[in-house]
Amino acid sequence: MTLRVGVLVSGRGSNLQAILDARRGGRLDVDVRLVLSNRPNAPALERAESAGVPTRVLDHERFPSREAFDRELVENLRSAGVDWVVLAGFMRLLTPHFVESFRDRIVNVHPSLLPAFPGVRAQAQALEYGVRVTGCTVHFVDHGTDTGPIIDQRAISVAPGETLESLEARLLEQEHALLVEVLQRIAQGGVELDAASDGRRRVRFS
């Protein structure tokens, strides 16, 4: 199955580039229907345009509320025929309307081994706490901040004397690989959500 995805971006778009490269190389069964940014000057838009992918800018500052902005996001994604949404460095919290509009079909990549260090500055927090191991997580998005069901993770050791810059670069490589791997697994129908006895939903690979 080919996933019809929309990618939301706010910045450089390196995770978007990983998706585009994997698609071009035949390693990922996705049809990127739209790349949408809330920032007009996001470099990610140039990456998409270079790959021939439609782009759109919705400046969140021009909307009266988060709800109004997200409703416009949903309308644009649906008009483009998007079934799955990938958050690739999208620096906005999503409203309940957006989450419910694409329930269990929103995927995010986060630079920590969740549930450790959710939210911003995850890499810096890992160094501040002196952890020996950190990593990245790809997860479904729910109504919390980085609280959705974990799909998969990759771990790396934190080297002695590790700098923030070196850790960010090493984690980014893992993010790219893991995101592509998870999206391909979803495209192949190998990711399912189960409800556990404690009420917490968990991912099962099939």
Image (cartoon, rainbow, N blue to C red):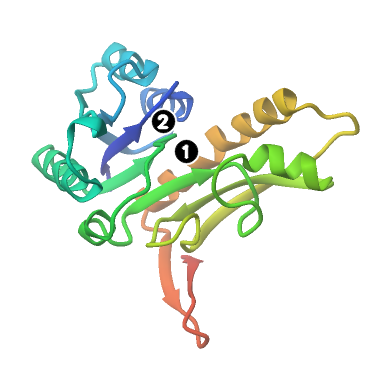
Residue sitting at the far bottom: 197
Q: Secondary structure at mark 2?
A: helix
Residue 108, label in figure: none
In x, y percent, where is residue 147?
Answer: 50, 61
Q: CA distance from mark 1 to mark 2?
A: 6 Å
Q: Nearer the viewer, residue 81 or 181?
A: 81
Location of residue 190 with respect to 73 vertically, above or below: below
Left or right, 111 with respect to 60, comes to right
Location of residue 90 with respect to 186 vertically, above or below: above
Q: Residues within 10 Å of mark 1 (few under 14, many from 20)?
A: many
For the point 39% across and 61% down, which residue is it?
142
Is residue 91 visible in the rendered image? The answer is yes
In x, y percent, where is residue 163?
Answer: 79, 26
Q: Are marks 1 and 2 in contact (CB under 8 Å)?
A: yes
In x, y percent, where is residue 18?
Answer: 46, 27
Say what amino acid the circle numbered 2 marks: Ile
Residue 19, label in figure: 2
